Amino acid sequence: MSISYKDQKMIIKKDCKRWKESGNIIVFANGCFDLLHRGHIDLLTESKKLGDILIIGLNSDSSVKLLKGDSRPIQSEDERMNALLKTDLVSKVYIFSEETPIKLITLIKPDILVKGGDYLPDEVVGFRELKSWGGRIEIVPLTPNYSTTSKIEKMKRQGLV
């Protein structure tokens, strides 16, 4: 059962207020996280080292379809969320349906926003907003040879999908 955007917004505000009042550094990362792999785990591990609370903005199933095409996601948003939470690196996962997580970023107001090494800081969605409240962007190097798209292509070549 999914909750309304209004209810999710209230939950997020309450969570973030509590964490910030406790002096926690909030780190935010986002993505599809379809077929969780070593590259994802490396990103999450490095992100968690930067603060106390690691929040993931997870693309909804409809958002993944818009970004990656009709054959994606491989796993549902519930499966992807549960996999992320079971890593013990992630404190909370919030699902967003838009093309970008800008609404979520401005609601959470993280101290640090993390993206993979295929971005420059000023290319990251939320760059200007983060600077406005004193936050910063951290770019984490990509783990070579690990991407969901390449894994799916390899599985196709091997006739597994």
Image (tube, helix red, strand yellow):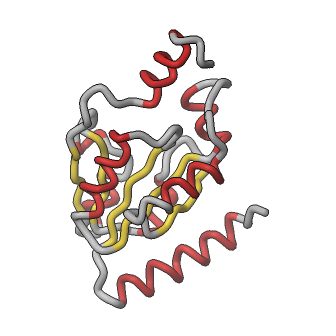
- Which quadrant is the C terminus positioned in? top right
Looking at the rendering, which quadrant does residue 29 occupy?
Answer: bottom left
Is 150 drawn above or below residue 112 in the view shown? above
Is 92 drawn above or below residue 62 in the view shown? below
Q: Residue at x 35, y 48 (%)?
A: 41
- Judge by depth and name the residue closer to the eye, 29 or 45: 45
Left or right, 98 with respect to 90, comes to right
* Residue 129 location (% of width, % of height): 34, 59
Q: Residue at x 49, y 55 (%)?
A: 84
- Judge by depth and name the residue closer to the eye, 128 or 87: 87
Looking at the rendering, which quadrant does residue 2 occupy?
Answer: bottom right
- Judge by depth and name the residue closer to the eye, 124 or 35: 35
Looking at the rendering, which quadrant does residue 40 occupy?
Answer: top left
- Which quadrant is the N terminus positioned in? bottom right
Left or right, 79 with respect to 150, comes to right
Left or right, 4 with respect to 83, comes to right
* Residue 55 location (% of width, % of height): 42, 64
* Residue 75 location (% of width, % of height): 63, 40
Q: Residue at x 31, y 57 (%)?
A: 113
Q: Residue at x 25, y 36 (%)?
A: 143
